[in-house]
Image: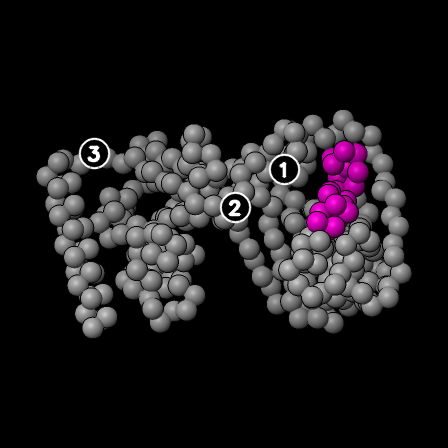
Amino acid sequence: MPAAFRLRRVRVALLVVAALAGLAATAAAQRGYRRFRERELQITNTPYNGQFTFVRVNYTTAPGGYWYQGLPAWSHGYPLAEQNLMRILNEISDLGPRTEEINSLRLDDPELFEYPIAYIIEVGWWDMSDSEAEGLRKYLQKGEEVGTVATLDELEVHAVLDQRESELAMGKDLNSPDVLAEVRLVSRLDKTLYPSETMMTEAGTETIWSPIITTLGGGEFQPDPRDPKGRTLQTPEFELRCKLANVVDEVTHQPFYQPGQRAYLKLRLDRKPLAWQWTRRFYQLIQTRRQQKSQLAEGM
């Protein structure tokens, strides 16, 4: 059951990654970033020569957006984050990017059109001008796709329930005090997390979020062999989702829990008599034997 962050893709132009600042004003006040004196970042750009150069978009930052050590919100991690990424690309690809020189341009700068990739973050603090809006429109029209990556302020755990398990939760308010959901991430098994919201699909589904919860990833559910991506189940199952508020590390000021890891989810519902538990286990045993026989028959 992977803890996942949400990814929304929109057909527009070129790759512009925008980390949205959800409730940024509140978060900034809580984290205490406002104690820094506001200051602007000195930018030194390298002239374009055809070599791949990563570009981060800078913009006029709205009041309250200087929470990152007194620097404008657009500059969070600049240029160290880009330098690390370019070093990785230089090791694993033939792109040959600049690894030290990271440029930063505004959207109304004509030079931006020389670069195929532009990176922009914390757009909730962006005080957009008319010229920047026009520049963004023209820049996107030259390409094919834009992606938006949400912040890690909230994680989402995906789980799959079989028919018998779903019967226990069906028709119940999973967010009521009578139901207790507990989550443990493999990176911190000693820490129990409590979701802010728990949801279950109203009907069985064959499509799942990730193949990691099938037998391909060490899970219990059989994927459809006709699906090369492993995201289709052989039989429809119910999906359970839990939302978790992430924690900010007090030292690094980065999200403490990272997405993509396996999670263990436990739902405490009404107690069932032993007779019901024995019947369920017997049914699971029969179902497992049938699956094993089916696999043997297919292999012959």
Label 2 vs label 3: CA separation?
32 Å
Disc 3 designates what residue?
A: 271
Q: Residue furthest front?
A: 91
Instruction: Name the residue at 40% across, 58% down.
Output: 211
The total of numbered circles placed on residues is 3
Specify the label residue 254 is tagged with. Answer: 1
Disc 2 designates what residue?
A: 259
Callout 3, which amino acid? Arg
Q: Is residue 71 magenta?
A: yes
Image position of 286 (left or right of 25): left
Verify CB contact (< 8 Å) between mark 1 and mark 3: no
For marks 1 and 3 on the same chain, the one whose residue lies earlier in the sequence: 1
Question: Which stretch appears magenta?
Answer: 65-84
Q: Which SS class for mark 2?
A: loop
Verify CB contact (< 8 Å) between mark 2 and mark 3: no
Label 2 vs label 1: CA separation?
13 Å
> Which of pointers 2 and 3 indicates the residue nearer the eye?
2
